[in-house]
């Protein structure tokens, strides 16, 4: 199950939050290329190499600007410290935590504020951090756990700096990590969909329910409202008005039976 999430509330954007799940038979990068066909812009991802094909110059819809996730970088260095108690790895973790603390103060601020404050506060930290990581890499075994963390980080270096110059971009991709958590929690029960069609239907329902949750809409009440509107012969041309953020507020909470 591939997930794409939009949540502009973090920078006071005007689009409602949404998540779209897509079912595929594998995790090959070609599926990401298919799902994002025609899209141009910035995409925040983890370090999976399958996304690199989206940056091809001959891609239909123009190349996508990939920005990467500092939470994944932190996890790499934390795992290194946890395994070896490396003081150098722990220092990197603490530095990334400083960046996260700045981000917490900027959550919900307009893009210009986020961009200005990141240039003032975060950019010097990021520049110094990459210099420090390079220095560490010069005197350690690169096949070690710490070396693996350094290699991962330096490979994604340019994409990790995008958030400094674009107030819409998050420091990490936790928004999409959060929306896939329900599937991760039932991972063993999610191994099989029965059929490709079953997987596609599952993806549609997961998209609707996940988008309901992002918008504070109770899923059962929303689906009841949708079926009622369809039963009233809503024209197909108006089906876009059935998206969760159009659900009337009075339908958000379902009355419990007495």
Image (spheres, grey):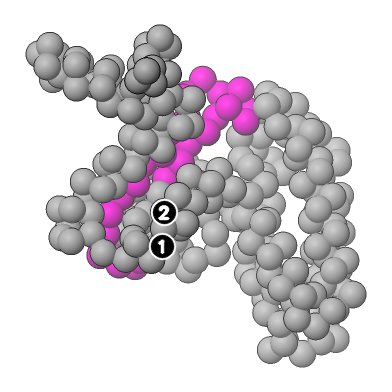
Q: Residue at x 56, y 24 (%)?
A: 13
Q: Position of residue 93 (x, y in %)?
A: 80, 62
Task: Confirm whether residue 40 shows in the render.
Answer: no
Task: Confirm whether residue 183 shows in the render.
Answer: yes
228 magenta-colored: no
Q: Position of residue 208 (x, y in %)?
A: 33, 34
Magenta region: which residues? 4-30
Q: Nearer the viewer, residue 156 or 7?
A: 7
Dot 1 falls on a residue whose secondary structure is helix
Q: Is residue 231 left or right of residue 166?
A: left
The correct choice, above or below, for 252 with respect to 147 in the image is above
Residue 142 position by quadrant? bottom right
Q: Residue at x 67, y 47 (%)?
A: 171
**What quarter of the picture does the N terminus occupy?**
bottom left
Q: CA gap, disc 1 to disc 2?
A: 6 Å
Q: Residue at x 75, y 32 (%)?
A: 106
Marks 1 & 2, CB-CB < 8 Å contact: yes
- Check disc 1 and report the residue beneath it: 187
Q: Position of residue 42 (x, y in %)?
A: 51, 44
- Check disc 2 and report the residue beneath it: 183
22 magenta-colored: yes
């Amino acid at each position: 199950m591939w997930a794409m999430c939009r949540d502009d509330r973090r920078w006071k954007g005007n689009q409602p939050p949404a998540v779209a799940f897509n079912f595929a038979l594998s995790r090959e990068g070609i599926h990401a290329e298919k799902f994002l066909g025609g899209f141009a812009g910035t995409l925040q991802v983890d370090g999976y190499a399958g996304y690199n094909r989206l940056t091809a110059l001959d891609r239909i819809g123009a190349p996508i600007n990939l920005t990467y996730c500092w939470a994944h970088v932190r996890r790499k260095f934390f795992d290194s410290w946890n395994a070896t108690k490396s003081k150098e790895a722990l220092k990197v973790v603490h530095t990334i935590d400083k960046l996260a603390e700045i981000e917490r103060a900027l959550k919900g601020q307009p893009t210009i504020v986020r961009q200005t404050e990141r240039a003032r506060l975060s950019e010097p930290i990021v520049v110094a951090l990459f210099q420090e990581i390079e220095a560490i890499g010069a005197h350690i075994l690169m096949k070690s756990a710490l070396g693996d963390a350094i290699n991962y980080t330096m490979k994604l270096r340019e994409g990790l700096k995008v958030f400094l110059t674009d107030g819409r971009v998050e420091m990490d991709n936790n928004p999409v990590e959060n929306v896939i958590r329900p599937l991760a929690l039932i991972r063993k029960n999610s191994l099989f969909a029965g059929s490709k069609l079953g997987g596609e239907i599952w993806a549609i329902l997961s998209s609707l329910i996940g988008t309901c949750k992002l918008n504070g809409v109770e899923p059962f009440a929303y689906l009841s409202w949708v079926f009622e509107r369809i039963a009233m012969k809503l024209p197909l041309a108006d089906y876009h008005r059935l998206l969760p953020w159009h659900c009337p507020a009075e339908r958000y909470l379902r009355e419990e039976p007495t």
